[in-house]
Image: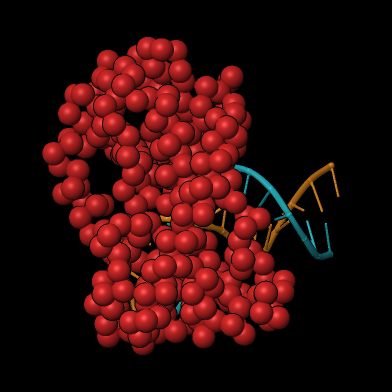
Chain colours: A red, B cyan, C orange
Amino acid sequence: MPELPEVETTVRGLRPVLQDQRIARVQLRRPDLRRAMPQDLGQRLTGARVTALGRRAKYGLIDTDRGDTMIFHLGMSGRWRVDPAELLPHDHLVIETEAGRRLALNDARRFGSVDLVPMAEVEQWAPFRALGPEPLGAQFTADHLKAALAGRTASIKLLLLDQKIVAGLGNIYVCEALYESRISPRRAGGSLTRPRLARLVEAVHLVLDAAIEAGGSTLRDYARPDGELGYFSKQFKVYGREGQPCECGGTVARYAEGGRSTFWCPKCQR
DNA sequence: CCGCAAACCTGCACGC
DNA sequence: TGCGTGCAGGTTTGCG
């Protein structure tokens, strides 16, 4: 499920459970995710106190007083279940705190990952080195996009999915942000003018902020034993809405590019 | 650099 | 009811 807002919501949901808490037990039930979890994950986490939780792009970061940062990625189907009554299939990692809270990382497709990186090396950690700016950070500007997209003939849709250009957008929120800024997903990235890029940056902010806010308001749902945390699909304007009317009077269309679906309104997105 | 495909793996919706 | 097909929020790699 997770793009940036879902990871942010996840981290906010984990914070009250883990912040300043000591880890009492770690159970690796199925370590072979997309990358194998480190074999010594349990040893290195057990007895450690969590000092901070954060997020970079679509990765969640959990710092410990042992000098390690646990970095998780939820892939396509990952989620943390909080205080589950019982463990389910695909609960691959279970963490218990001394206070008696329990977290289970459930990931049916196992496209996710869990790594343990010395805090001092996190910035240089290979998956992070090439990441572009945070879409909600001060560095994500029309100027940045203008430079990053210069000369690129690939579609703006595909380029926004490129984590080197901006780190944290996925298929859903790229579609939504392009709709919000009325930019055609088919347009060559390098052809966009600065004013249109400024609109795009604003649209990205708008769409992500709204999704995070919606996530924040459902933290109670998130913390339910079933751990349900969905996208807030009711507020999608185009994603998953092929054939439905657009506010402009057009009809939401869909096409495949790079093996993925793009949803857009051909009438009002130019 | 571009566009595409495949790989990783499971679940679900759909049509027959 | 059961089976086959296609599709799904991500990332990486390789080919022409």
In the image, what residue occupies the spot 53% across and 44% down?
A215
Q: Inspect this view and state whether residue A90 appears.
A: no
Instruction: Residue C8: give x, y in percent of width and height.
Output: 56, 58
Quarter location, residue B10: top right
User: Where does residue A91 sit, x and y in percent of width and height?
Assistant: 50, 30
In this orientation, does residue A253 appear? yes
In the orientation shown, which residue stands out farthest toward the left?
A: A120
Q: Is residue A63 left or right of residue B6?
A: left
Q: Quadrant of residue A17?
A: top left
User: Residue A14: image x %, image y %?
Assistant: 43, 31
Q: Is residue A118 left or right of residue A221?
A: left
Q: Is residue A203 above or below residue A102?
A: below
Q: Is residue C3 left or right of residue A121?
A: right
Q: Residue at x 55, y 47 (%)?
A: A214
Q: In this rendered view, identify the residue nearer to me: A14 or A84.
A: A14
| On screen, residue A21 above or below A59 | above
